[in-house]
Image (spheres, rainbow, N blue to C red):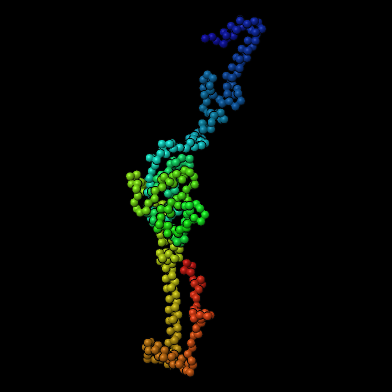
């Protein structure tokens, strides 16, 4: 190791006189700068921090300079939150069933009991099962549907008057004038499977694949039994399909159960109020009637209540007899429809009667 002075002297010998003068000047400036920095220390540079212990080219200070490090270094921000950025999620590619998964031996079998079920709702559920709409692997371009077994086809129901007025048209000859019309009730007796068959086909898209699915996987049977017990079918949750009952098939005001639960108590309370009002009115009239009879007897009587009422009734009848002596009885004139012997009667207008729902 050599000192700075020895290095300067060796450089001056190797160089010429002019270069030696330059080296001496540079060395002198360096020595002067070092002495000045050692004397002034932290005041040498503007904005510098006074160092406590020099260590080579680094300065060890007790207080960090502001603006030179992150804010969290000062400890004023407390615990720093974990860096967890939200990625721009684009999703993953959907899984598409392969050919083996779409084979018929891998399809599930479902059993539907059509007893007392609504026709259209049942048809939509059967259609979804055939097409595999409830399958998590469903894709419009792939066939992941199931088999559907429908029993008790003759017990399916419709709402309202459709049992009598719903019509079915068919023209098997495809010729003009060959159309045949049949009511729901007649077709249900003759060919009940055709009712569900027509409803399911209307609920499916009219495509070649739907036609193939409809022909191969829909199994309809009359009665509770079928021919596919060997396939071990799963019972479809029929509580998802609404039933047609007396409560759902009648209007609310015509439903006896709803009337007994909701309207009957209101009507009974209203009638009780009317009876109480009428009883008070009759009692007030009866008291006035007895008071008139008591005044007619001089204000005093030895009769009890029943005797006083009987005497008042006898006096009333005598008064009526005296007023109507020699008069002909008033006969009510009967009115008939013109040209007939049908008597006219007053028609009761129920539209003006109070509605129990508004009570």
Image x and y of residue 328, in percent: 48, 92
Could one spot residue 261 in this view of the protein? no
- Label count reads 0
**Percent x, y for residue 272?**
42, 73
Residue 136 picture quarter: top left
**Left or right: where does residue 52 sit relative to residue 136?**
right
**Image quadrant of residue 256?**
bottom left
Q: Nearer the viewer, residue 328 or 308?
A: 328
At horizontal 49% and vertical 75% (from top left) the residue drawn is 348
Residue at figure coordinates x 49%, y 67% from the top left: 358
305, above or below 42, in the image? below
Viewer-proximal residue, 282 or 182?
Answer: 182
Q: Is residue 27 visible?
A: yes
Front residue of this view, candidates 272 and 226: 226
- Residue 116 in percent (x, y) is at 39, 57
353 shown above or below 75: below
Residue at horizontal 47 percent and vertical 43 percent from the top:
209
256 relative to 293, above or below: above
Give the side of residue 219 with respect to residue 82, left or right. left
Q: Residue 257 placed where, x, y %?
A: 40, 64
């Amino acid at each position: 190791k050599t000192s700075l002075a020895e290095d300067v002297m060796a450089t001056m010998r190797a160089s010429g006189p002019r270069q030696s003068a330059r080296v001496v000047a540079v060395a002198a400036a360096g020595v002067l700068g070092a002495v000045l920095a050692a004397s002034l220390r932290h005041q040498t540079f503007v904005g510098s921090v006074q160092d406590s212990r020099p260590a080579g080219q680094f300065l060890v200070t007790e207080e960090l300079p502001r603006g030179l490090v992150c804010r969290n270094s000062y400890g004023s921000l407390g615990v720093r939150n974990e860096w967890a950025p939200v990625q721009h999620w684009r999703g993953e590619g959907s899984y598409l069933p392969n050919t083996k998964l779409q084979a018929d031996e891998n399809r599930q079998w479902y059993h539907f009991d059509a007893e007392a079920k609504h026709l259209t709702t049942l048809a939509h559920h059967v259609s979804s099962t055939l097409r595999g709409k409830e399958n998590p692997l469903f894709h419009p371009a792939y066939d992941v549907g199931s088999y559907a077994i429908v029993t008790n086809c003759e017990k399916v129901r419709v709402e309202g008057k459709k049992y009598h007025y719903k019509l079915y048209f068919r023209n098997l000859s495809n010729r003009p004038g060959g159309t045949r019309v049949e009511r729901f009730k007649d077709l249900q007796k003759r060919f009940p499977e055709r009712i569900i068959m027509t409803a399911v086909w209307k609920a499916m898209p009219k495509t070649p694949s739907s036609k193939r699915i409809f022909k191969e996987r829909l199994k309809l049977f009359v009665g509770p039994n079928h021919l596919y017990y060997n396939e071990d079918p799963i019972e479809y949750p029929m509580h998802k399909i609404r039933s047609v009952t007396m409560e759902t098939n009648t209007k609310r005001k015509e439903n006896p159960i709803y009337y007994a639960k909701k309207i009957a108590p209101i009507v009974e309370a209203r009638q009780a109020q009317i009876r109480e009002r009428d009883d008070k009115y009759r009692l007030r009239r009866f008291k006035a009637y007895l008071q008139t009879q008591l005044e007619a007897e001089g204000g005093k009587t030895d009769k009890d209540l029943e005797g006083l009422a009987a005497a008042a009734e006898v006096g009333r009848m005598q008064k009526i007899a005296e007023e109507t002596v020699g008069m002909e009885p008033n006969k009510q004139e009967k009115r008939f429809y013109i040209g007939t012997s049908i008597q006219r009667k007053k028609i009761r207008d129920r539209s003006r009667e109070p509605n129990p729902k508004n009570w």
